[in-house]
Amino acid sequence: MSDTAQLASDAGSRDPAVGLRAVRALRTLVDRLEALQVENARDQGWSWQEIAHCLEVSRQAVHKKYAGGRGLLRRKD
């Protein structure tokens, strides 16, 4: 079984320690995937509004999280 599939399985564990660790690991994975896809979208010319629409959040929320050298998409100048 893949690591991700194992995490998904562990998230449903009756043991809270196992389940909570899995949930935390999945949350970290989702955050990294979101940052990667936001960066891909911006590199392809997507607006903050288009990205926000896909993520079902406000334009301001996604901009605050990823623009201006903050968040996971820090630009190196």
Image: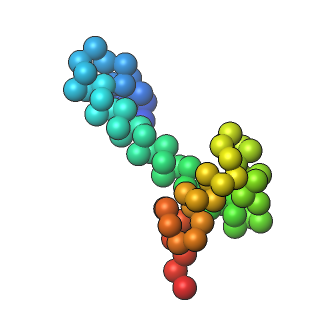
- Residue 4 or 59: which is nearer the viewer? 59
In the depicted structure, whether residue 4 falls above or below residue 77: above
Relative image position of residue 70 (x, y in whole percent): 50, 67
Q: Residue at x 69, y 64 (%)?
A: 42
**Dividing the image into 4 quarters, which one contains the N terminus?**
top left
In the depicted structure, whether residue 5 falls above or below residue 12: below
**Dividing the image into 4 quarters, which one contains the C terminus?**
bottom right
- Residue 67 or 46: which is nearer the viewer? 67
Q: In this view of the protein, can residue 38 be seen by the observer?
A: no
> How many labels, in total?
0
Which quadrant would residue 2 be assigned to in this image?
top left
Left of 17 or right of it: where is 46? right
Looking at the picture, the colour scheme in use is: rainbow
In the depicted structure, whether residue 19 falls above or below residue 77: above
The furthest residue to the top: 14
Q: Residue at x 41, y 37 (%)?
A: 26
Left of 77 or right of it: where is 46? right
Q: Residue at x 69, y 67 (%)?
A: 43
Relative image position of residue 76 (x, y in whole percent): 52, 80
Which quadrant would residue 6 be assigned to in this image?
top left
The furthest residue to the front: 60
In the depicted structure, whether residue 21 falls above or below residue 15: below
Left of 13 or right of it: where is 47? right
Which quadrant would residue 68 be assigned to in this image?
bottom right
Q: Residue at x 30, y 29 (%)?
A: 20
Q: In this view of the protein, can residue 39 be seen by the observer?
A: yes
Relative image position of residue 67 (x, y in whole percent): 60, 66
- Residue 15 or 62: which is nearer the viewer? 62
Relative image position of residue 37 (x, y in whole percent): 62, 54
